[in-house]
Amino acid sequence: MLLGRYIPIIGPLAIAGSLATKNSVPNSEGTLDASGMAFGVILLGVIIVVTALSFFPALSLGPVAEYLSI
Amino acid sequence: MKRNRTLRLFDRSLIESALKESFVKLNPKVMMRNPVMFSVEISTVVMMVITVMSMFSNDIEYGSFNYNLIIAVLLFLTLLFANFAEAIAEARGKAQAASLRKTREDTPAKRMDSDGTITVINSASLLKNDLFIAEAGDTIPLDGEIIDGIASIDESAITGESAPVIREAGTDQSGVIGGTRVLSDRIIVKVTTAQGESFLDKMIQLVEGANRQKTPNEIALTLLLASFTIVFLVVTVTLKPFSTFANTPVTITALISLFVCLIPTTIGGLLSAIGIAGMERALGANVIAKSGKAVENAGDIDVVLLDKTGTITIGNRKATNFFPVGDSSYENLSKYSLLSSLSDPTPEGKSIVELADSSKRMLSTELLEGAKFIQFSAETKMSGVDLKDGTTIRKGAWSAIQKWAINTSYTREVDHKCNEIGKNEGTPLVVAMDKKVLGVIQLEDIIKPGIKERFARMRRMGVKTVMVTGDNPLTAAFIAKQAGVDDFIAEATPVDKLEYILKEQNDGKLVAMMGDGTNDSPALAQADVGVAMNSGTQAAKEAANMVDLDNDPTKLLEVIEIGKQLLITRGNVTTFSLVNDVAKYFAIVPALFSTSIPALNSLNIMQLSSPDSAIISAVIFNAFIIPALIPLALKGVKYKPLGASALLTRNLLIYGLGGLFVPAIAIKLIDMVVSLF
């Protein structure tokens, strides 16, 4: 519980807080636009891949196995 | 010609020493710096224990002996491959630096004591701040700064540039490099760095393993990889109780194999090699970087300050046109300009000679016999020649010639021409013979060829170019537009440079600049990336964080590309490593459970032949992908200056999709071979 719930909450909040205190660098040609399509797609892809990698083995034992056995 | 020192990708002697190093690096104290590979080392040890135990027990927990042995050996190979990658990168870095250092060793030096006596000693005995003499024919023993005299020096041993250079005390060109040869005259030099402490030596320490500090980017990436390792450790460890609950026992071997395949070993093993290779590429471009951080920062530079003279324009003004006035002919003007310039040592004079008809040069040498050459002086603002037969020829500023010449019937014409030339940002030089004005020579700043394209490339990379010059604003604006720089600082003093850098940094931008004089030191120190020319003063070299051996002002562009290349290579290999896991999953997970849950075989999309062969194939792929990617790590990804989004998308497509399909195909192929046994 502690690990699974609170660390994923506290972690990103700490990162956000640390970033907020830093200077902002102005946009240039080399900046990756955080509101652009490329960024959005990449973010989605990374989230899916990393989450899948973490949960796939456990899932495959449970729900996936059940589904395939039916 | 700039010598670009690139090593062949694999050199026999380098490989041998790297192989030996790979074993030496297995020491846990060394491995601990790399969390990912350290985990693999621990897994290998556990695996070896299991193998031994499986020899004596028939417990199904332990699996078959052969199988365990194979996996243990494969894990050990993974470790060796990762160490090899780092070792060979280090070996290349050292070889690159050694080739630079070779010429500096054991040269005799003529040390000068405080009373003026000269003793010949070995260069190794020279201490910092000692004085030594170097005369024509001597090799300079150590890096130093000329405190008296002027000499021409052949620096080809270090820079590969065969044309001799002039170094003089008290100027911005007072630095001399150990290993170069004096061609003429005599100089007194003060040693600035003792042997073993030069910038080159410090850079060698940067590539050698023991003293290497991790750069901030490396630390961040290592943290990320460590957190992935922890996550995957939890995933693997929790699988044991899950599997027991589901009545599908898994062997420890299988779990360890899953763990090692999941953690990002590809990037974990190659990370340091990529960093070292970046430094080595900087050395190959004849740039000595004082820290890995400087090279990485170079990749993120937003603004670049470049001096106009020597960078954007070819050093000195060049004669481009002759304009005769009144009744003088072009022929005449050209002939007398030639006569007055043949003995003129200034570059302007030489360019006038070039412009004039070269066929007349023969004639002129006869005419010049017994002639007296009048040097240019700041008071007269003229130079010229007095011929044997009494003819006097002068050339110089219009204001000066006007006073000298008596026949001023063409004053208005000359005025008009001079204004015209001035408007086009050139300099007019008036020529007169026997006090009569012949015409005007137009001198222009010539923009170096290819500069415009280089600046366009920088703009595409997102870097703003700024030209710094002592010219007046009008001239500066004209040249700036011609060369294609984004901004310029006119009538610039060293303080102006510093202020500009501070202003940009306050806006959050990263600034790079090149300099060679002591008065550039504050600006060089303040800039995020300061590149000092090796011919510059010691103060400039101390203040900067990189030293350019070629004294090439456009080197900054290459340094920026090397920095970007370094960061992009890291990102791409990380992506590849993580996406590989997807394919490895589809190999291992069905293999783990399909014996007890046959339905899971439908997940076996690669149709691998058996659980054992599936796991072995995956582990083989995991081990061998590391050496397979070593060439990519050492050479770096090719950098194309697109915008950030485009570049990222392109790289992700290549390494992301590639990371999905390459392991799938590779594992399938390996499996087909393995299943034959």
Image (tube, coloured by chain):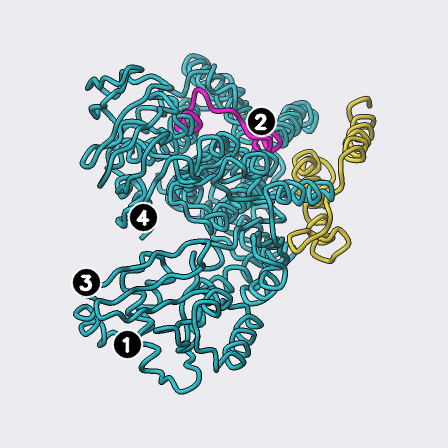
Instruction: Give the amino acid at mark 2.
Output: Val
**Between residues B564 and B145, which one lies in front from this camera angle?**
B145
> What range is drawn magenta here?
B204-222
Badge 1 crowding class, 10 Å Cα cut-off, few under 14, some 14 to 19, many 20 or more, is few
Residue on which the image places disc 1: B357
State which chain is coloured cyan: B
> Is B218 included in the stretch rendered in magenta?
yes
Q: Split into 4 quadrants, where in the image is the C terminus of chain B?
A: top left
Tell me the tag on residue B370.
Answer: 3
Instruction: Give the amino acid at mark 3.
Output: Gly
Q: CA distance from mark 3 to mark 1?
A: 22 Å
Q: Earlier in the sequence, mark 3 or mark 2?
A: 2
Between label 4 and label 1, give the one nearer the viewer: 1
Q: Residue at x 29, y 39 (%)?
A: B151
Residue A37, how many percent across, how many down?
Answer: 73, 58
Badge 4 crowding class, 10 Å Cα cut-off, few under 14, some 14 to 19, many 20 or more, is some
Q: CA distance from mark 2 to mark 4?
A: 59 Å
Residue B331, how many percent across, how many down?
Answer: 31, 82
State which chain is coloured yellow: A
- Identify whether B33 is placed above or below B651: above
Q: In the shown orientation, is residue B119 left or right of residue B235?
A: left
Residue on which the image places disc 2: B250
Residue on which the image places disc 4: B3
Helix, strand or loop under label 2: loop
Q: CA distance from mark 2 to mark 1?
A: 91 Å
Helix, strand or loop under label 4: loop
Q: Residue at x 42, y 12 (%)?
A: B56
